[in-house]
Amino acid sequence: MTLKDEERDTLIKYRTEQAHEMVDEVRFLIDNNKLRLAVKQIYYGMFYILCSLALKHQFKTSKHRELLGWFNKTFIKEGKIDRKYGAIVHDAFDNRTESDYGVKRKFEKAEVEEMFSDMMDFITTIENQLIKED
């Protein structure tokens, strides 16, 4: 099923809004010492903005790793986006996995604050890429 331009634009806007909602949610979670959940939502904020980028390029997948691989191949390796953003999103994915399944992993507040800062930088960078492509 191919999305019409209008439908795709609506979905891009929706996913971008979800990313921004995650920024507010993560701030709340950090402020209330819900660090494991904050780590998980940090990744999802990046995931949602990457979904916007994928929609823009008509890339479809239901797999997180495929989305990250596509982003790395299409934007990082091609030099369209700085390599550090590939590392940021991959680290966020690994941290989310550790938050969900890791029994012994404890996240410190300062560490999660740094992840949060990276998340906001990542979202801004991907949004700028989307604007540049319009």
Image (cartoon, rainbow, N blue to C red):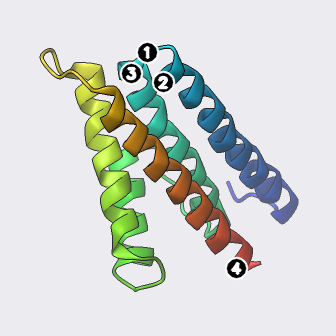
Q: Earlier in the sequence, mark 1 or mark 4?
A: 1
For the residue pair 106 and 14, the one nearer the viewer reads as: 106
Name the spot of residue 116 as percent of width and height, x first.
46, 41
- Residue 44, compared with residue 11, is above or below; it is above
* Residue position marked by numbered label 2 in the rendering: 30
Name the spot of residue 62 as percent of width and height, x first.
46, 44
Q: Are marks 1 and 3 in contact (CB under 8 Å)?
A: yes
* Residue position marked by numbered label 1 in the rendering: 34
**Distance from Cα at disc 3 to Cα at disc 4:** 35 Å
Amino acid at pointer 4:
Glu
Residue 35 is labelled as 3
* Residue position marked by numbered label 4 in the rendering: 133
Amino acid at pointer 1:
Lys
Which tag is nearer the camera, tag 2 or tag 4? Answer: 2
Name the spot of residue 15 as percent of width and height, x first.
68, 45
User: Which residue is painted at 39% across and 30% down in the image?
Assistant: 39
- Answer few, some or many: residues within 10 Å of disc 2's Cα (few below 14, many 20 plus, some between 14 and 19): some
Which tag is nearer the camera, tag 3 or tag 4? Answer: 3
User: Which residue is painted at 63% across and 43% down in the image?
Assistant: 19
For the residue pair 82 and 48, the one nearer the viewer reads as: 82
Q: Evaluate whether residue 88 shows in this view.
A: yes
Q: Secondary structure at mark 1?
A: loop
Q: Secondary structure at mark 4?
A: helix
Q: In which image quadrant can residue 21 be found? A: top right
